[in-house]
Image: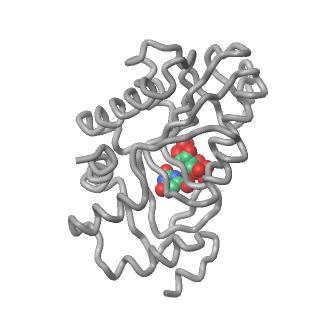
Amino acid sequence: MSVEKIVAENLLSIKAVSLQPTSPFTWASGIKSPIYCDNRLVLSFPEKRSVVVEGFVEEIKANYNDADVIIGTSTAGIPWGAMVADKLNKPFGYVRSSNKTHGKGNKIEGKVEPGQKVVVVEDLISTGGSVKDVVDSLREAGAIVIGVVAIFTYLLPAADECFKALDVPYSTLSNYDVLIGVALENNYIEESDLEKLKAWKKDPKDESWMNK
Ligand SMILES: O=P(O)(O)OC[C@H]1O[C@H](OP(=O)(O)OP(=O)(O)O)[C@H](O)[C@@H]1O
Ligand SMILES: O=C(O)c1cc(=O)[nH]c(=O)[nH]1
């Protein structure tokens, strides 16, 4: 089985994926969604956690082996980034969502020098807004962001546009289309759930899917 399918099956089997069409989730971007994928839960399952860590390690070795530093996004990217950096024996740091209001007032924690090549580890990409903020902060500090890796993407056009504008390559271990396929195959969702999911996915910002 492909890594994409294994990760999707793992997310479903530990109930990291929730469907709540009648009581939508609010995402970081403000989008209302019938689906939420809580990758943080994977941290509690060592075997499934290893699949993600190994997946990231392989991806970084294959495509970004020249990275000087691994950077996690706050907060959900931090544990993944730290575990991956440890496996690769590379330095690790993380970027806060805003500057700390006490102490050193840092936004970037850990050592990142101008000119260093950085790979950003994110847990999940919806619109890409959170990663954009991290990439902008790292670039302001003079770092060169050579790639972004994440566990999961919803494959929203907004994310592709965001990464195109940033001019940064990204890859994920699994994605929405694979997840829905695996969920249907293994009876995690019913055909009847699909209509709402399809209507939502067509234009997540258009909330009329709620009345379908
Ligand atoms: O692609 P985007 O539209 O930015 O959405 C994805 C982001 O949203 C979630 O973070 P959240 O803000 O919930 O914070 P957390 O990482 O602290 O849980 C998730 O962990 C991603 O970082
Ligand atoms: O966009 C988000 O905020 C988001 C969506 C999702 O499915 N999971 C998550 O952790 N965040």
Q: Where is residue 151 drawn, in percent x and y?
A: 43, 43
In the image, what residue occupies the spot 40% across and 61% down?
A: 177
Q: Quadrant of residue 68?
A: top right
Classify residue 152 as left or right of residue 193: right
Q: Nearer the viewer, residue 32 or 101?
A: 32
Q: Is residue 70 above or below residue 121?
A: above
**Coloration of the structure image:** one colour
Classify residue 134 as left or right of residue 153: right
Q: Where is residue 85 drawn, in percent x and y?
A: 45, 20
Q: Is residue 193 above or below residue 212?
A: above
In the image, what residue occupies the spot 75% across and 24% down?
A: 105
In the image, what residue occupies the spot 45% across and 65% down?
A: 35
Q: Nearer the viewer, residue 51 or 5?
A: 5
Classify residue 132 as left or right of residue 59: right
Q: Where is residue 7 drawn, in percent x and y?
A: 31, 47
Q: Where is residue 204 drawn, in percent x and y?
A: 58, 69
**Looking at this rendering, what residue extends furthest in the front direction?**
62
